[in-house]
Amino acid sequence: MTLFSRERGKLSGVARGARKVANKFGARLDFFSRVAVMLHAGKSLDAITSVQTVASIWEALVDPDAFAAASYVAEVIDTLCEPDFAVEELYDALCAFQYALARGADRDALLAAMDLHLLDALGVGPELDACARCGAVLGRRPLKGGRARLSPQAGGLVCDACAAALRSGGITEEGATVLHVSAPDFARLRELRRMPLDEVGKESHPGRLHRITQAFVEQQMGRRSRALAVGAAGSRVKRAAGRRR
């Protein structure tokens, strides 16, 4: 099993016999549950010898979209975090995300906020106040046409001149290198970056904020998210089944 702890960060452990019906703690090791565990150090893997449930949101994860969101966050943490390297800020954000997901927070805003908190905790958060290429401070000023330009490759906000330089260098917008973001969406991203995850509300927004932050996460991962690809396929099947009815 892969665990993410406050004290040691990401670690791998083995729960011997956990799949057996009679096992005394197998059911407590559900996906995305928060538990207190006792570990016995082994040569290659630590053995889980005791488990106590702290918080479980399994009933909420029955919803396919919620399961896809949790799977995405787990995938990103597993990919970007080094073993045995504690990141307490990220652990706290993960606990808050679990709580917010269970209470039905707006999923697009919640995932966008989690992306920003996660990247900041790992020291690779996007620059949202100055141009990531030339350092020009942009503050609250709208950019050309009232839209901000964000580049995952550049590391965040880019001024109009730097965006033009990226395009002239052969990097196209179709390749998601320069993302055009409306002024309200850009302001919302700045707000979500500062907002505690457990304060993200239930108000629904068009599903576009997470598409922006996801591009920065996948730039760090070096690949597309597999969890969201599976989740999107499941949503298409669900919609098709609804139309057939």
Image (cartoon, helix red, strand yellow):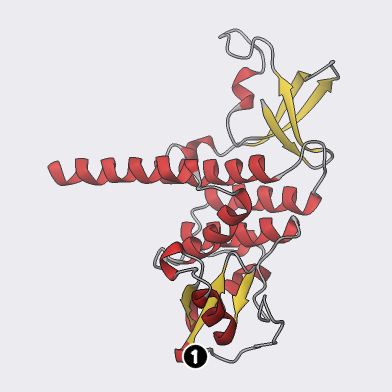
Write down the residue under mark 1.
Answer: 144
Give the image location of residue 51, x and y in percent. 73, 24
Could you say which is closer to the camera, residue 89 or residue 149? 149
For residue 85, above or below residue 107 = above
Residue plotted at (77% across, 36% down) = 83
Residue 245 shows in the view: no
Q: Is residue 40 left or right of residue 62?
A: right
Q: Is residue 121 left or right of residue 29?
A: right
Give the image location of residue 161, x and y in percent. 57, 86
Give the image location of residue 7, x and y in percent. 84, 40
Q: Quadrant of the N terminus?
A: top right
Could you say which is closer to the camera, residue 58 or residue 135? 135
Q: Secondary structure at mark 1?
A: helix
Could you say which is closer to the camera, residue 97 or residue 102? 97
Q: Quadrant of the C terminus?
A: top left
Residue plotted at (34% across, 42% down) = 233
Residue type at mark 1: give it.
Lys
Residue plotted at (84% across, 16% down) = 42
- Given the current orientation, which residue lies at the most extreme front position? 169
Q: Is residue 158 left or right of residue 171?
A: right
Residue 37 position by quadrant: top right
Q: Is residue 201 left or right of residue 220?
A: left
- Given the current orientation, which residue lies at the most extreme left position? 244
For residue 27, above or below residue 153 = above
How crowded is the residue under tag 1: few (<14 C-alpha within 10 Å), some, or many (20+)? few
Residue plotted at (58% across, 41% down) = 75
Residue 200 position by quadrant: bottom right
Total tally of numbered discs in the picture: 1
Give the image location of residue 17, x and y in percent. 65, 9
Residue 10 shows in the view: yes
Could you say which is closer to the camera, residue 68 or residue 245? 68
